[in-house]
Amino acid sequence: MVTGIGAVSPAGVGSTALWEAVSGGRVATGPVTRFDASAYAARTAGEVPSSCSPELDAAVPPHPSRAARYLAVATAEAVRSAALVPGRVSGRTGVFAGTVMGTRPVLEQGLTETSLAFTGTEWAEPERLLDLIPAVVDVDGPVVLLASGCSVGGDAISRGAAAIAAGEVEVAVCGGVEELSQEVLAMFTSLRALAPDVARPFDADRRGMLPSEGAGVLVLESAEHCAARGGRARARLLGHASAADAYHLTRPRPTGDAVVEVLTTCLKQAGRTAEQVDWVCAHGTGTPVGDGIEARAITAALGTVPRRPVVSSLKGSLGHPQGAAAALEAVVAVKALRAGRIPGNATLRRPDPACSGIDLVPPRGRTAPVTTVASLTFGLGGGVSALMLGSAEADDAA
């Protein structure tokens, strides 16, 4: 059961701000302001707006890492929306989080600002991302931080779901987090993978991805625990799967075997048929190679009869928030299930003929019944994660 959701994103603080941006086709990326990007050919990214600073300050204590604050604020919203009252939660509660760059921006600050006293390396250790979590949720179970690439948010949600299924915990706070860093801009610049203006997933004129940041959090519970405490399900996690094709550091296998595998696994877990999937929230970063492979793999897994798979990527609106990507997309999936609306490909102008096997949702989105959503995320090195979410009224859950 998904009982709570929370988010911090380039659209602002909160899951409502996130949903309004992606469902309305708003592009939330823009010029980099966090650091001097003048030396880079591409200087656009998705930053959490500086105007959100007072809201973040009011919600959580100061911390050297913005990412730690993003994660804590998203967690606080998810816990509130799940109606979990601190100090009154029965059952073991665990935290399962994922990231790619960890506290790298803190390290960059320490290397470039003499005002930041260097007293050791502990302030830059990845686990410091979790420092503020005890301030917003009572944790008496395992605390796990994963770093499996850009699919890590999905892996963290899968790990939390597995912990519930195994009886390890009864409440799992799961998600992903990322803070924009200069290193990630440099890395993707060296790979020549950055778009000069906006990311255009599945567009014939796509030229690359845009890095971004944020945090997405889901609260998962067993159906029994939710019912016993009088909780309310927002959605059901019907299936989850991870795989790695180990084909190339930056390119997925041309046949998309890992994508087919995770989608097929999720369908089996969920007891669903391909035609019952109302929306595929695709990884779709806007890279020339990756989007075409993903489109063909989705078609291979879900077919085109009686209709082509309905597909959109949120990265035209948000950029690619790396470790936060899968979790933010899961938050949007929960919103879509409840709203009966499918977000569009915000920057789509000219659909790539190579992606003709999928039904690309236009920029302004589409109103339609949504009962089952599949969400895909990829990571460098061949990692692939898939989540399948269903409406709270679904008959069964994984």
Image (tube, grey):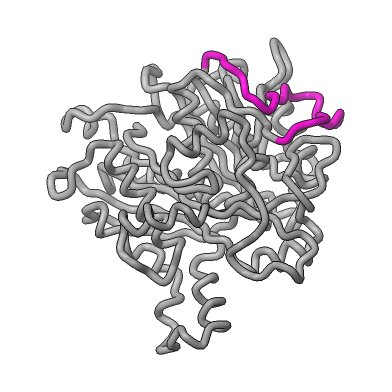
The answer to whether any part of residue 346 appears in the image is yes
Where's the N terminus, which quadrant?
top left
Relative to the observer, which residue lies in front, 109 or 38?
38
Q: Position of residue 285 (x, y in %)?
A: 70, 45
Q: Residue furthest left?
A: 88
Q: Residue at x 54, y 70 (%)?
A: 105
The answer to whether residue 101 is magenta is: no
Q: Position of residue 49 (x, y in %)?
A: 52, 53
Q: Position of residue 243 (x, y in %)?
A: 60, 46
The answer to whether residue 357 is magenta is: yes
Q: Residue furthest top?
A: 306
Relative to the observer, which residue lies in front, 223 or 37?
37
Q: Main secondary structure of the magenta part?
A: loop
Where's the C terminus, which quadrant?
top left
Seen in the picture, residue 147 relative to 162 is either above or below; the reply is below
The answer to whether any part of residue 165 appears in the image is no
Magenta segment: 347-369
Seen in the picture, residue 308 relative to 66 is either above or below; the reply is above
Seen in the picture, residue 303 relative to 216 is either above or below; the reply is above
Q: Position of residue 353 (x, y in %)?
A: 86, 28
Q: Residue at x 35, y 55 (%)?
A: 72
Q: Residue at x 32, y 34 (%)?
A: 3
Relative to the observer, which residue lies in front, 50 or 295?
50
Q: Is residue 265 left or right of residue 164?
A: right
**Number of marks in picture:** 0
Seen in the picture, residue 391 relative to 217 is either above or below; the reply is above
